[in-house]
Image: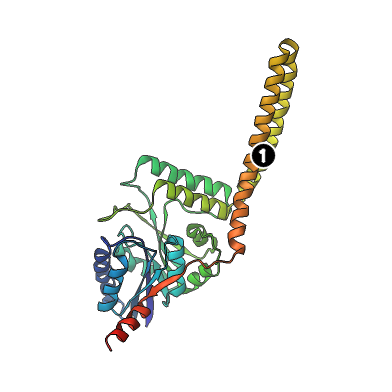
Amino acid sequence: MKLISVVVPCYNEQEVLPMFYDEIIKVTNGMKQEHSDIEFEFLFINDGSKDRTLEIFRELADKDERVRYISFSRNFGKEAGMYAGLKNSKGDFVVVMDADLQHPPAFLPQMYNYVKDGEFDCATTRRVSRTGESKVRSFFARMFYKIMNKISQTEIVDGAQDFRFMSRQMVDAVLSMSEYNRFSKGIFSWVGFRVQYMPYENVERPAGTTSWSFWGLFKYSLEGIMAFSTAPLSFSIFLAIFGAILSVLFVIAGIITTIFLPALGAALLVIGALLLVGAVQLGCTGILGMYLGKTYMEVKNRPIYLTGETDEMYRERKKNSSK
């Protein structure tokens, strides 16, 4: 029998979880009828939710022994949730998907067909439209992919999703990259392997609200740039060169101006030079500081996540309380 692990990171998903569970069960039951040699486990990750998400996990674990879960001690972010799911998955194949049904479970049969015979190591969806998104958000998303692919040696496909069906070999490769500051889209691309991209139209959430704000996505994009490109360091050098050239022009202009208006020329020369040098120093120091901050977090060797409760702990506690 081949085991397929379905990893589902969750944060405040109480409204959509019952719908997701019903849909994933319907799809996986259909797959088992077609392929008698497969079994499923469902590994839910509670990323410090403040609603009833954990309670729903417990209810699902009570009625379905295939349901497993890990509940973090606090919110560590989706990247930590995906890492925890991959690390604790037991399957020969692993699926990573969201609970909000924007990653349609109906794609799983086709994904499995691509990966099961070894023709591909990964099947993933690629969003070809951004229906339901604001134009501003869509614009910045497209700009991020363009910038990222120009400044990084790792190509990230525009519209590629975290919704992935992977072989165990690819999962182990992803887990071998255990850095603290994670950017999974870049990691999935960096490890390589044979990937089949499946185009699909964007699907809106049937319930609940997304936890990704514009500011959150912006910070996440910065994580990707800092994790997979050293271009900002090169940019600081070009900025310093440009600043030096501009300062020379200020000096020349100041000298010429002082011939006719000495006081004004001297003032412009001093003020312009100070502002320019200060801006260059702050820019370079800021970029170097961001990289130093990343290094600081890495060398601390902190765990990527901490577990507060698992399905095994819950079942054991329930068993003991019934004695």
138 relative position to 105: left or right: right
Q: Residues within 10 Å of mark 1 (few under 14, many from 20)?
A: some
> Looking at the image, which residue is at 70% across and 36% down?
241
- Visible in this render: residue 281? yes
Q: Which colouring convention does the figure follow?
A: rainbow
Image quadrant in which you'd find residue 28 = bottom left
Please give the residue where the numbered disc 1 appears in the rendered image.
281
Residue 183 in picture, x, y percent from top left: 50, 58
304 relative position to 275: left or right: left
> Looking at the image, which residue is at 45% across and 50% down?
158
Closer to us: 48 or 193: 48
Residue 96 in picture, x, y percent from top left: 40, 66
Residue 191 in picture, x, y percent from top left: 54, 64
- Visible in this render: residue 119? no
Give the quarter of the figure containing the N terminus.
bottom left
Closer to us: 285 or 1: 285
Above or below 38: residue 282: above
Closer to us: 305 or 99: 305
